[in-house]
Amino acid sequence: MTTDILPRIAVLATGGTIAGRAGDASMTAGYKAGVVGVNDLLDAVPALGNVARIHAEQIASVDSKDMSHALWTTLAQRIDALAAQDDIAGIVVTHGTDTLEETAYLLHLTVKTAKPVVLTAAMRPSSALSADGPLNLLNAVTVAACAQAKGQGVLVAFNNQIHSARDVTKTSTYAVDAFRSPEVGVLGFVQDGRVEFQRAVTKAHTLASEFAVGAQWPMVEIVTSYAGVSRMAVDALVAAGVKGIVVAGTGNGSIHASMTQGLVDAVKAGVAVVRASRVGSGHVMRNGAASDDALGSVSAGTLNPYKARVLLMLALAAGVEEAGALQRVFERY
Ligand code: ASP
């Protein structure tokens, strides 16, 4: 294949361990994230030249634990601008693993394109023996250049697997196999240059989403229910002017009686309350372990608390505030 007919893929770098460097190649935990530039990351993967023509941009150089709403806005707007260009076939974002699932879902709900947008990352810094970043990057570009990836929303290519941004979550603090899509599983695989999808995304996203990034990021915080918890955190958030609270509840979104009293008052004060679960997989059923009808709350379904917070922020920013309307949003996305 001549290289001039290869698709042109934009690679937007934001930092993370994939761009990390340690003083010693044996170190996989003691390193600084986000210090290697995008051109060096690309140079480490000569095989990219057989897959795509790369347009590279350094959007940021952050450890993704410090991801900000402002950077989300910059990233989403840049993706939309690049996707509108005829000469760009797809977009890859390199990111830290810590908040990858939040950024991926935010972009899934806000970018307006059917072109593939694929996030990738690494668990080991670029300086490590057996660094996982180079192959993850090659696989992400391979997926972004693939026609079957169109219209599937934002994807995550990691460890030879393809996940939907909606479902993927980090499940290991150290393993190279660090991401899962609990219950629903992977969308497909990418290996040795071949991309295979096994299922499709059915919830609304990208072009079918009503949401967009904007100047407004309403204050939405997460509280966790646990043995002996009080209503103190909820009361403090309401006093601080929070617009929404996501509860990482026990089990099927159940909430300690003490905290529930605080949430009842929060709803009366006009705060939107969403029940999710701290468990890590499974549904939170409406009116299941707690009565959403009585509390005036919304159930998060299969969204984990961090993704539920992203959706609640976007919905509130779009003026969706009433509990019934918010519940419909949580069912649609
Ligand atoms: N702290 C790093 C980050 O999220 C971890 C990683 O990328 O694996 O940027």
Image: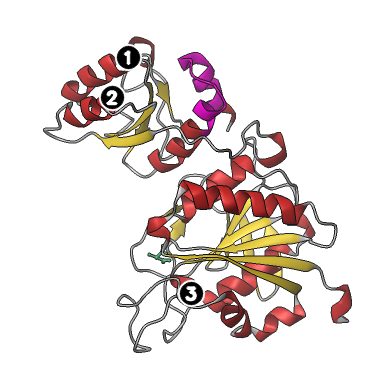
Residue 228 rendering spot, x and y as whole percentages: 11, 33
- Label 3, label 2: how far apart the Cα atoms are: 39 Å
Residue 15 rendering spot, x and y as whole percentages: 49, 67
From the viewer's side, name the closer residue of 240 and 191: 240
Q: Earlier in the sequence, mark 3 or mark 1?
A: 3
Q: Quadrant of residue 130?
A: bottom left
Q: Quadrant of residue 27?
A: bottom left
Q: Earlier in the sequence, mark 1 or mark 2?
A: 2
Asked if the stretch drawn in magenta spans residue 320, the answer is: yes
- Rate crowding at label 2 as few (under 14), some (14 to 19) or many (20 or more) other CA atoms within 10 Å: many
Amino acid type of the residue tagged 2 in the rendering: Val
Q: Residue at x 66, y 45 (%)?
A: 111
Residue 197 rendering spot, x and y as whole percentages: 68, 56
Q: Is mark 1 within 8 Å of ligand 1?
A: no
- Label 3, label 1: how far apart the Cα atoms are: 44 Å
Q: Assign a secondary structure to mark 2.
A: helix
Quick check: marks 1 and 2 in contact, CB under 8 Å?
yes
Q: Quadrant of ligand 1?
A: bottom left
Residue topped by disc 1: 269
Q: Residue at x 58, y 38 (%)?
A: 214
Q: Residue at x 73, y 52 (%)?
A: 81
Q: Quadrant of the C terminus?
A: top right
Q: Is residue 30 left or right of residue 123?
A: left
Query: What numbered label is drawn on residue 238?
Result: 2
Q: Assign a secondary structure to mark 1.
A: loop
Amino acid type of the residue tagged 3 in the rendering: Ala
Q: Farthest residue in the front direction?
A: 215
Q: Nearer the viewer, mark 3 or mark 2?
A: 2
Q: Which residues are magenta?
A: 314-330
Q: Is residue 246 left or right of residue 227?
A: right
Residue topped by disc 3: 19
- Rate crowding at label 3 as few (under 14), some (14 to 19) or many (20 or more) other CA atoms within 10 Å: many
